[in-house]
Amino acid sequence: MISHLITFVLGAFTGAAGKYLADKYTDKRRSKEKETGKRKIFLNLAEKMPDVIKEMQEDLSKPECMVIREFYLLPNDRVLFNSGGERCLFYYEDQHENLTHKIKLLENNGFVEDVTHTNTPKYRMTEEFVDCVIKAKIKSKKVKL
């Protein structure tokens, strides 16, 4: 009787441990697949806008901008804009062809979020996107991670 009880408890423990480990490693695999998928999407989009990604990379590499995640789209650098004292980045439509459409592509793929609350388009970058931008290697319109 006791041997049956011990066998049952050991079997239950083994089954629970097996399920736990299987779930744990399945979650890790899915997370890695998702990350790989997002990186492929980033590379695809970055090759459509290497100049924008390069400028963002340069901005995010500056010590004073390393934690800034929000940016505004403005027609050109002659437009005066008061951001209310908050630090943010600016990208200019006259410096990048179809900039608004390129940012919309990033938004559609979950890399930036539209947080506009005035007439001036404002976006917030995701940490995943910032990580990809910083790690991107851009050479003659080709982008690699």
Image (spheres, rainbow, N blue to C red):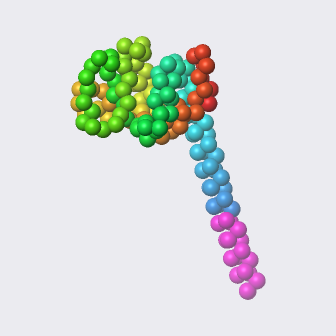
* Helix, strand or loop: magenta stretch: helix
Find residue 91 and report its horizontal and vertical position in percent.
38, 23
Residue 9 lies left or right of residue 89; in this view the side is right
Rendered location of residue 67, percent (x, y): 43, 41
Residue 67 visible at all:
yes
Magenta stretch contains residue 111: no
The one nearer the camera, 19 or 110, is 110
Q: Quadrant of the N terminus?
A: bottom right
- Residue 142 location (% of width, % of height): 60, 19
Q: Residue at x 60, y 26 (%)?
A: 137
Where are the magenta residues, as a range? 1-17
Residue 114 visible? The answer is no
Identified at 70% across, 81% down, the residue is: 5
Is residue 17 shown left or right of residue 59? Answer: right
Left of 26 or right of it: where is 57? left
Which corner quadrant holds the C terminus?
Answer: top right
Image point (64%, 46%), residue name: 29
* Position in image of residue 99 (x %, y %): 40, 18
| Res 84 → quadrant | top left
- Of 100 and 9, nearer the camera is 100
